[in-house]
Image: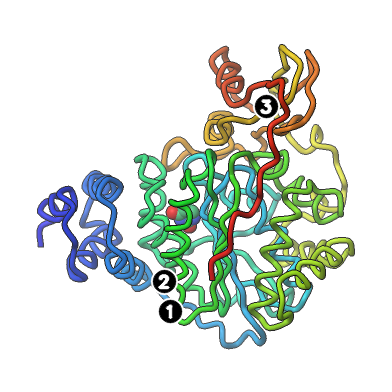
Amino acid sequence: MDILALINKKKYGQELTREEINFIVEGYTSGSIPDYQMSAFLMAIYFQTMSISEILILTEAMINSGEIYDLSSISGFKVDKHSSGGVGDKVSLIYAPLVASFGLKVAKMSGRGLGQTGGTIDKLESIPGFKVEIPFSEFVKIINQTNLSIMSQTDNIVPADKKIYALRDVTATVDSLPLVAASVMCKKIATGSDGIILDVKCGNGAFMKTISEARKLAQIMVELGIKFNKKIAAEITNMSEPLGRTIGNAIEIYEVLQALKGTGPADLNYIVCESAALSLCQAGLFSDLATAVTACQAKMQTEEPLNYFRAFIKAQGGDLNFIDNDLPLKDILKVKNIIEIKATQAGYMEIIDTTELGLLAVRLGAGRATKNEEIDYHAGIYLNKKTGENVAVGDVVMTLYTNRYITEPVYKWAERTFKIVTVKPREQKLIYEIIQ
Ligand code: URA
């Protein structure tokens, strides 16, 4: 088979066969197809998209590029949750200990930051000592001990996705519906959970900008999940502003701890409890969602979820001082430059470009602009004001933390992400719909 012919075939919008998709996935994973040809192929998919049967074959090819985990030695209902990618999206890190505290087993494999969005693995790695690369046997052992473990993709599980994911990040091919669907679902299927919750982000900070695009992605992923005999639900959630007030890595862990200590932001708590409640219903612990949500909210008022988080961090080698010391942000973030962006007029804050906010965090060092770039775990953004909040002239609306040398254009960049309006913006729904 000839890779050039296959790039051309997709370029002209034709449907690829199973053999052709397998050839490309195997070739790229093994290294016989180079980055530049795979980049062209991904861009062709971006413009021409894929049929549902091509997406299914792509998902299977990525699953078959590595091992499939057998979680049968873990008793109980195994759950997993995945986000299609958001800015300031730390939901999984609170959801996991919350459902673990109800006795569910969280077996989660997560990714790194992609495009403007942060990655759970990068956030966890900002905890000194925390190990994200653990062998499968340890993953199982930790779940059996603490009810939850989160690991990064190893080379032997969906290696095709690991490679393609990193390439998409630096070739502007992230926000492609078939590529997101296959990338998310291959990981969910290969890690062998019984129940899957998908958080499909929608809005100006998400890869899917409109509800109809997000719905299409959610429906495809739910269809893929059902084909693989999984209990699956997808929520379409609002990403027209970041969740909570923090964007970055260590700064987001700080907010996770606040949430687990009962002082987290309301938008974050709401999505966490809804997502956890969906898992509790899938596991059969509750028969209606509203009762499950109430139970989750009550549980968040106890110390249990924090204790599960603590045990999980300890089991994966993380420094518990980070959790126990209750340090203020200024002592957690070791950065040379702290820049305050101030309001030049009075009114209400309105965040207008969450993707640019995410990319600004990348520019500050919190994400990668090239494939092998090192992350600065301490870089990030704190939103002193969120949409709808009152702003007076001179108020700090956001604070940038970075070790990089920051010049004038970065201030301008920050200023382009929001405006101060005279009429209070209408409150938006946080969850648009649930598809299952
Ligand atoms: N998360 C993934 O795992 N893959 C994507 O493509 C986007 C979000």
Which residue is at a point 31% across and 66% down the rendered structure image? 52
Circle 1 sits on which residue? 228
The image shows residue 165, relative to residue 309, as above or below, that is: above
Q: CA distance from mark 3 to mark 1?
A: 44 Å
Asked if residue 285 is positioned above or below residue 387 in the image, the reply reads below
Q: Quadrant of residue 132?
A: bottom right
Identity, as a three-letter code, of the amino acid under mark 1: Phe
Please give left or right for residue 161 compared with residue 383 in the image: left
Query: Dot 2: what SS?
Result: helix
Q: Earlier in the sequence, mark 3 or mark 1?
A: 1
The residue that mark 2 highlights is 224
For the C terminus, the quadrant is bottom right
Which label sits in the foreground, 3 or 1?
1
Name which quarter of the figure residue 159 lies in: bottom left
Residue 275 location in percent, x, y?
66, 64
- Left-right relation of 375 to 319: left
The answer, for residue 133, to whether it is visible in the render is no
Image side of residue 27 versus residue 344, left or right: left
Q: Amino acid at mark 3?
A: Leu
User: Do the numbered discs 1 and 2 sit on residues whose CB atoms are within 8 Å?
Assistant: yes
Residue 94 vs residue 314, the one in the foreground: 94
Image vertical order of residue 75 relative to residue 421, above or below: below
Kindly indicate the quadrant of the structure image that contains residue 144.
bottom right
Q: Is residue 229 visible?
A: yes
Q: Look at the picture and state if 96 lies above or below 201.
A: below
The span from disc 1 to disc 2 (Cα, nearest Å) is 6 Å
Check disc 3 and report the residue beneath it.
Answer: 400
Beta carbon at label 2 within 8 Å of ligand 1? no
Residue 134, image x, y percentages: 57, 66
Seen at 68% across and 83% down, the residue is 284
